Image (cartoon, grey):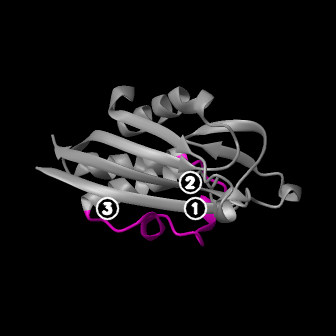
Amino acid sequence: MLRVGLGFDIHAFADPAQGRRLFLGGVEFPGENGLSGHSDADVLLHSICDALLGALGLGDLGRHFPDDDPHLKGVSSLLLLEKVAALMRERGYRLINLDAVVIAQHPRLAPCFEAMKERIAAAVGATPAEVNIKGTSPEGLGSLGRKDGVAAESIALIGKI
């Protein structure tokens, strides 16, 4: 049995005075201003979590990890992804293929795609060959084009073990 899920997330950049670190796909971008959010605000991992939860018919990330839970303040989204992957395995599924795109005017993402794939694959118990990450620029259009934030969209195909 195969199931497909779609995930999307978007976060604004935080006020630089907050000193937040930027994480995308579980990779830190040193020297870059981070995104605003309750956790580490990794939009790519959040969209992947939502894609997996959607494929499982289990709602969304906020249902499982509410943004008013003080225990989740500043939590690594890699940990959230690992917990979602555990839910997937408990139900007898595994990742077959993941395709994700990060939509951002800044920062430059391509040099980090392989590291992102490796971290994501490790968190979900897959191989890097089963994970595809790409980026696109909004070409200066809209709030993302003005560098107000970053968005990500993911689609996951899972199958019964």
The reply to whether dot 2 and dot 1 touch (C-beta < 8 Å) is yes
Can you say which quadrant of the picture contains the C terminus?
top left
The reply to whether dot 3 and dot 1 touch (C-beta < 8 Å) is no
Task: Answer whether residue 38 is visible to the viewer in this image.
Answer: no
| Amino acid type at mark 2 | Val
The residue lying at 52 percent from left, 34 percent from top is 116
Nearer the N terminus, badge 3 or badge 2? 2
Residue 118, position as x, y percentages in the image: 47, 28
The residue lying at 20 percent from left, 54 percent from top is 3
The residue lying at 52 percent from left, 53 percent from top is 152
Q: CA distance from mark 2 to mark 1?
A: 6 Å
The residue that disc 1 covers is: 10
- Image position of 68 (left or right of 18): left
Residue 47, position as x, y percentages in the image: 46, 55
The residue that disc 2 covers is: 43
Q: Quadrant of residue 54?
A: bottom left
Which residue is the extreme one toward the right? 17
- As helix, strand or loop, the secondary structure at mark 3 comes to helix
Kindly identify which numbered label has been placed on residue 54: 3
Residue 88, position as x, y percentages in the image: 28, 50
Our reading of the magenta stretch's main secondary structure is: loop
| Amino acid type at mark 1 | Ile
| Amino acid type at mark 3 | Gly
Q: Is residue 70 magenta?
A: yes
Residue numbers of the magenta segment:
57-77
Q: CA distance from mark 3 to mark 2?
A: 16 Å
